[in-house]
Amino acid sequence: MSEIRAAAISNEAGSGPITLTGQAATRAMCSVNQVGTISTRSSLNVSSLTDVIVGHSTVTYTNAFVSALYGATQGGGNNGITAGICRNLAAYSTTSIRMDNITTSGTFADLPQTDVFVIGDLA
């Protein structure tokens, strides 16, 4: 059996991390607290958040996608309210995505945790 141990894995030039190519992996992720002042709980490839209006937030990527034809999933919930969809393809762009939280009763709501995961090719 082989074993590989490393403190860091860098690119061929030794100047930075390796890039994921030819693999299906999450390229962007954001866990957001929308209640009060919008904030990031944790994130990957996210440069900023914008609180658009109640139940609507925009996540802006650090590194853009090749096209807006990527896959995304969103979910969230709190105290019996389950919500969260990336419901509008117009909300997908190469540099950002809008998250819309629609409750089971059809209203928009800010949630203490709503998460989005994005898979696609980075530019």
Image (cartoon, helix red, strand yellow):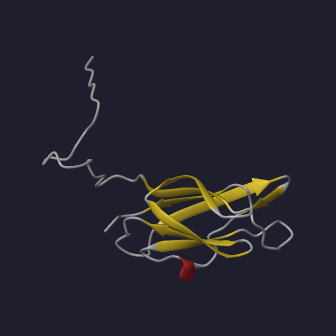
Query: Where does the N terminus fall, quadrant-wise?
Result: top left
| Closer to us: 87 or 18 | 18
- Seen in the image, is 13 located left or right of residue 32? left
Q: Residue furthest left?
A: 13
**Rendered position, 37 above or below 18:** below
Identify the residue at horizontal 37%, vertical 65% (top origin).
63
- Seen in the image, is 38 located left or right of residue 83? left
Rendering coords of residue 105 (x, y %): 87, 69
Rendering coords of residue 94 (x, y %): 42, 75
Q: Residue furthest top?
A: 1
Query: Where does the C terminus fall, quadrant-wise?
Result: bottom left
Identify the residue at horizontal 72%, vertical 68% (top origin).
101
Identify the residue at horizontal 23%, vertical 49% (top origin).
16
**Rendered position, 57 above or below 116:** below
Task: Answer with the quarter of the image where residue 2 lies.
Answer: top left
- Seen in the image, is 26 located left or right of residue 72? left
Identify the residue at horizontal 34%, vertical 72% (top origin).
66
Q: Residue furthest bottom?
A: 90
- Seen in the image, is 105 located left or right of residue 73? right
Q: How many marks?
A: 0
Task: Answer with the quarter of the image where residue 114 lies.
Answer: bottom right
Q: Residue furthest front?
A: 37
Rendering coords of residue 95 (x, y %): 43, 74
